[in-house]
Image (cartoon, rainbow, N blue to C red):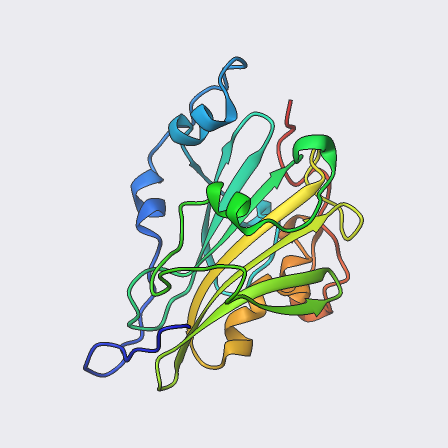
Amino acid sequence: MMQITTPTAGTVARRVVLLPLLMALVACVASPFVSNLSLQTLQTSQQFVMQRLDQTWAAPNGSLVMIERNLGVESEQIVGLVNQTTIEGDNFLWLRARVPDGRSAGRFDLNAFLARTEGVPVPFTTVSDQNLRRAVDSLGTYFYLEWRSGGSTNCVLAFRRIDGADRILPRGTNVLEAMLRNCVMGTIEEALLPIQDRQIGVSPVAGGTPAEGGSRMLSPLAAPPIE
């Protein structure tokens, strides 16, 4: 059962919060890829570097900053999103372009998915197949949890995976995985927008905006080649 709590006392201040990780990594320089390192080793050693927002693989509204790292056979981006709430933590869209074992996307596996992320962000504490909700849009199924403050602030933790049959993906990959943590002074539906087809189905690289209907797909040149 999902926990429902109330934000800390005081009026809600309008603020913009960046991921602490993003701020810490602005000055970092990416490490060169060493071919004999395992993916697991790269996940703990490879640093993120700041990239231009017009190089993101999606077009979530409220994007502030994007960092990216090359994991050899995979690539990862984190997009920091505007946060105007007093809820602890930061809003972000995590993206990972990869080729799964066997080169087939297969079914969504929550535990395997979370093993590739930094875990469950606050205000969420646990997530399981049993407490996930699901919804469908033009890109397929996505899964999410709700966190309600009891007031005007609501949060979502959402997951999805998109394969090459649904949209063009970064070169050398056939699956794009996404995780969204988004707290808004609005509805659950508004909080889910960055992971839905009209925003995650388009990219600034391809030109256009989600307001144009999400008809533009990601250019295969949106990411650096994965060798």
Say above or below: 89 vs 100: below
State the residue at coordinates (68%, 49%). 107
Residue 11 percent across, percent down from the top left? 23, 83
**Residue 22 shown left or right of residue 96 in the figure:** left
Quarter-wise, where is residue 100 in the image? Answer: top right
Quadrant of the rendering where the C terminus is positioned? top right
State the residue at coordinates (66%, 48%). 205
* Front in this rendered view, residue 113 or 91: 113
Quadrant of the rendering where the N terminus is positioned? bottom left
**Residue 136 shown left or right of residue 190 in the figure:** right
Residue 176 percent across, percent down from the top left? 64, 46
Say above or below: 155 vs 6: above
Q: Is residue 201 visible?
A: yes
**Residue 222 shown left or right of residue 34 in the figure:** right
Quarter-wise, where is residue 9 in the image? Answer: bottom left
Say above or below: 94 vs 197: above
Q: Is residue 209 visible?
A: no
